[in-house]
Image (cartoon, rainbow, N blue to C red):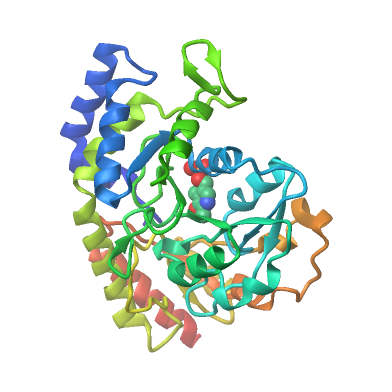
Amino acid sequence: MQFVDLVKQYDEYRREIDAAMAQVMNSAQFIMGPQVKELETALAAFTGSRHAIGCASGTDALLLVLMAKGVGPGDEIITTPFTFIATAEVISLLGATPVFVDIEDRTFNIDPALIEKAITPRTKGIVPVSLYGQAADMDAINAIAKKHSLWVMEDACQSFGASYKGGRSCNLSDFATTSFFPSKPLGCYGDGGAIFTNDDAVAEMLRALLNHGQQERYRHSWIGINGRLDTLQAAVLIVKLKHFEGEIRRRNERAAYYTAALSAHVKTPGVPAHNLSVYAQYTIRVKNRGALAEKLKMRGIPTAVHYPVPLHMQMAFSPLGYAKGSLPVSEKVSEEVLSLPMYAQLPQSDQDKVISAIIAALKE
Ligand SMILES: *Cc1c(COP(=O)(O)O)cnc(C)c1O
């Protein structure tokens, strides 16, 4: 059994994907080919965002927005400690300080009720993460940001395709970023990412920054990076995006199947009624996580832990000086979460094996 079987997905769309990739290779427009624009137009239409800007990865997407907003030494950016390191890594990389705010016990997303206490005169923006595929409480976060004149960037690297109160993730705040890493809900065949905004001026700057700050050929307005999206990846994504609504539905069907069978035995994902998750992960919570994972492994069931160490407890962030116990919900959750196999093509027979293995292991 596989945790995510990307070959099964390729098999489903093989003819279309092979043709799209061959078209790029026959044109040899590997960098900034027309497929990049075509994808951007489709991504903007899908999310309702005015600008969708393809870039090289989710990490670059986060970095580029911070660069465009001029984030640097002395600035503080509020974010969650319960996420992949990239969210906070880019803040530190620019010499600014990530300020970690604890999460909600139910959704694992940043707790809006704790944000205001963390705001100081140095705070420039808030970076909530829409973890495991469901949007953070963006209305509450946007309201706090507005009151304090801060910008908001949704790290939607796991939530492309999710909905929140009728709006689409990636179009819920000033800026949003997503990742097309192969195992993300919408994945390409290498690295890829995108930035979303309704701000015309920042969008223009972002387009330059991801191409060495260049607006006209060899005329560089700003210091930028090589953060372009490959044409080949754009071609793959154009095909996959056409099938993505169906994949969201199938992921939700699989999540509902797990929840119906498991909710009497373990804590299943908490998704408020105003959210539609894309289930980047289907993550349960158990007290004896290590023992359960080991027993499942012995029965041939792959699992994963997202994430075993919250960022404020990572060695890389030890200079920030957070004490153990300072962000108790994140610390507790990091010891209890366990992600189960989840992808649109996941066979029901695999799910049945996962379910019966969990129930049997918990009885031992
Ligand atoms: C995957 C991920 C990223 C980084 O995306 P890459 O495309 O791998 O650079 C950032 N933030 C979160 C929450 C992610 O899950």
Q: Residue at x 56, y 74 (%)?
A: 111
Q: Residue at x 33, y 47 (%)?
A: 186
| Nearest the eye: 83 or 212 | 212
Above or below, comparing residue 326 to residue 20 in the picture: below
Q: Is residue 192 visible?
A: no
Q: How far across and down, in percent of the image, does residue 305 sit?
A: 55, 63
Task: Left or right? Give the position of 197 relative to 108.
Answer: left
Task: Left or right? Give the position of 66 relative to 211.
Answer: right
Q: Quadrant of the N terminus?
A: bottom left
Q: How far across and down, in percent of the image, does residue 292 sit?
A: 53, 75
Q: How far across and down, in percent of the image, does residue 108 sit?
A: 52, 71
Q: Residue at x 36, y 18 (%)?
A: 30
| Nearest the eye: 163 or 197 | 197
- Count of number-bearing discs: 0
Above or below, comparing residue 290 to residue 181 in the picture: below
Q: Residue at x 47, y 69 (%)?
A: 296
Query: Residue 260 appears in which quarter of the rendering?
Result: bottom left
Above or below, comparing residue 206 to residue 215 in the picture: below
Query: Residue 151 appears in which quarter of the rendering?
Result: bottom right
Q: How far across and down, in percent of the image, does residue 359 sit?
A: 41, 82
Residue at the far left in the pictured view: 15
Q: Is residue 162 visible?
A: yes
